[in-house]
Image: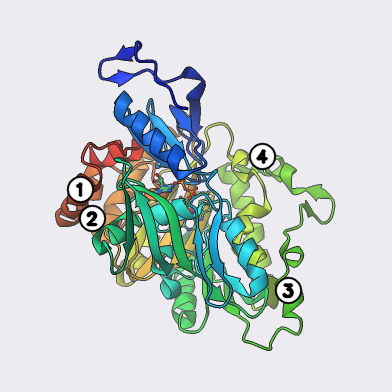
Amino acid sequence: MIQIDERRTRGKTAVLPPDKLERVWAWGGASSGMCYVYRPTTTEGLQRVFELARQSGRSVGLKGGGNSYGDAFMNSENIVLDLARMTRILDWNPETGVIQVEPGVTIEKLWQYILGDGWWPPVVTGTMKTTIGGCAGMNVHGKNGWQAGPIGEHILAFDLMLPSGEIVTCSRSENSDVFHAAIGGFGMLGCFISLTLQMKRVYSGYLAVETAAPANLREMFELFHAHVDHTNYIVGWIDAIAKGDALGRGDAHLAYYLPPGADPNPQLSLSLEHQQIPDTIFGLIPKSAMWMFMRPFMNNVGTSLINTAKYVAGRVGSGKRYWQTHAAFHFLLDYIPNWKRSYGPGGLIQYQPFIPKENAQEAFGDILRTCQKHGLPNYLSVFKRHRPDDFLLTHGLDGFSLAMDFLITDGRKPEMVRLARELDAIVLAANGRFYFAKDSTLRPEVVQAYLGTETIQRFMALKQRCDPKEVLQTDLWRRLFR
Ligand SMILES: Cc1cc2nc3c(=O)[nH]c(=O)nc-3n(C[C@H](O)[C@H](O)[C@H](O)COP(=O)(O)OP(=O)(O)OC[C@H]3O[C@@H](n4cnc5c(N)ncnc54)[C@H](O)[C@@H]3O)c2cc1C
């Protein structure tokens, strides 16, 4: 039973029970806020939290796994509705690959549930800790963005609870405007309470992988151009510290599904035991301790050394072909638990611009040089290919993205703000877009410029229809739209 202390009200907002007050951290650890956190397990529990919000005059921010790098699920001094305990698989048809889940089901639970039947999620994120509700809220992409599109393209339908408690069913044919805006609508129209998705048939627990090590940005683009028509996945890593002729050097991994019959023992490779990621390195060092070894290298000199070693190793191994399990290929970042702790107490932020293919090579060259000029090269850059889609607030376009992790310290913060402003100008001049899941630095005028007034007005009209009292809010919403 949820209680409000009616006697203790400040202005129009009631004071909520202090035992619900928690510090909620952005995934990157560079910002946080004190929030009243509620963790319902049922739709009735969820309805009661919305009722509490209406009575107490507090706003509600939705949280899945909390893997957005910035303030997308934070709602300082207000309610955070944490969906991570709504984890039931509601329906699964191993003949058709159609699954219905509650919003708190993680990508990890999803793939582990379906793989034995010969299916894999069509889009997965670089960590398996994300929830399906959170993935739909941001309309996430994978390493196959130009082929499979974002996850929204594989969502067949969902039930959305509005802050009034009403439940609306949405699909491409029913409430299609809400369908296309709530996916990617970062939790501002309603709360997904069940989602139905189409999975992808696979004939092996392995992918066939090839490596390459482009010597500069031009070669990286050439590699992607040459392979997008026939690979299923491509992802590049860029050494953001290399300069001059080596600017944009890195490595790339290309992966292909195995056709039926290629794997001599699919039953074995599709088993969960076979997909397990080992928890030690060389059978000795526990991976949970790895971040401590990485910590001394988290500066420009240390990262330069590591990047050079990684690039040279990539050159030596270039052209290698091998089979790798789906889990190992996709969830590389989960290999090193708590790796973000290596960034130290100030944490990290990510900046991921999306640039149309015609302008991408020049713009990403400018971006890398601008970061170096400010003395703030990023310590991890991931390069991907995308395609446009028809979701209202999409970040997708026919082009490329570069996700860059920046170390944050008190000393670096003012320079980081200046850098982000310069990068925003480069991205806008190149007709690029941004991604709320990774954002910590955008300003309303930049969002206005890339989304356009008409798109924002259409979204606001839907917000007015679904949430007229603006109960759903987050720190990100207030930063960019209010
Ligand atoms: C290591 C790492 C790797 C990543 N790799 C990728 C990647 O490859 N591709 C990519 O696209 N992203 C990637 N991300 C970003 C991440 O996938 C997105 O931020 C995703 O939205 C996080 O899911 P979550 O469950 O943690 O949701 P949260 O971060 O908790 O929430 C995300 C948004 O969805 C909203 N929301 C949550 N639940 C619901 C719900 N039930 N109904 C409506 N709205 C809801 C929230 O309000 C918030 O705005 C990565 C993040 C990390 C930390």
Q: Is residue 210 above or below residue 366?
A: below
Residue denoted by label 4: 296
Give the structural element (helix, strand or loop) at label 2: helix
**Position in image of residue 188 (x %, y %):** 31, 45
Q: Secondary structure at mark 4?
A: helix
In this image, 140 relative to 345: left or right? Answer: left
Q: Looking at this view, is 86 or 204 the one in front?
A: 86
Q: Amino acid at mark 2?
A: Leu
- Give the residue pinned by disc 3: 269
Residue 41 lies, in percent from the top left, at 52, 41
Measure the alpha-carbon separation of dots 3 and 4: 38 Å
Q: Name the N-terminal-most of marks 3 and 1.
A: 3
Q: Which residue is mark 2?
A: 451
Rendering quarter of residue 417: top left
- CA gap, disc 4 to disc 1? 52 Å
Compute the Cα span from label 3 to label 1: 48 Å
N-terminal-most mark, 4 or 2: 4
Q: Position of 432 compared to 97: left or right?
A: left
Q: Dot 1 surroundings within 10 Å: few (below 14), some, or many (20 or more)?
A: few
Q: Nearer the viewer, mark 4 or mark 1?
A: 1
Inspect the image, locate mark 3, and give the three-letter code of the amino acid beneath it: Ser
Q: Which residue lies most toward the right here?
A: 284
Disc 1 to disc 2: CB gap under 8 Å: no
Going from N to C along the chain, the mark reached first, 4 or 1, is 4
**Do the numbered discs 3 and 1 sit on residues whose CB atoms are within 8 Å?**
no
- Ligand 1 is within 8 Å of the C-beta of the residue at disc 1: no
On residue 465, the disc is 1
**What amino acid type is highlighted by mark number 4?**
Pro
Q: Secondary structure at mark 1?
A: helix
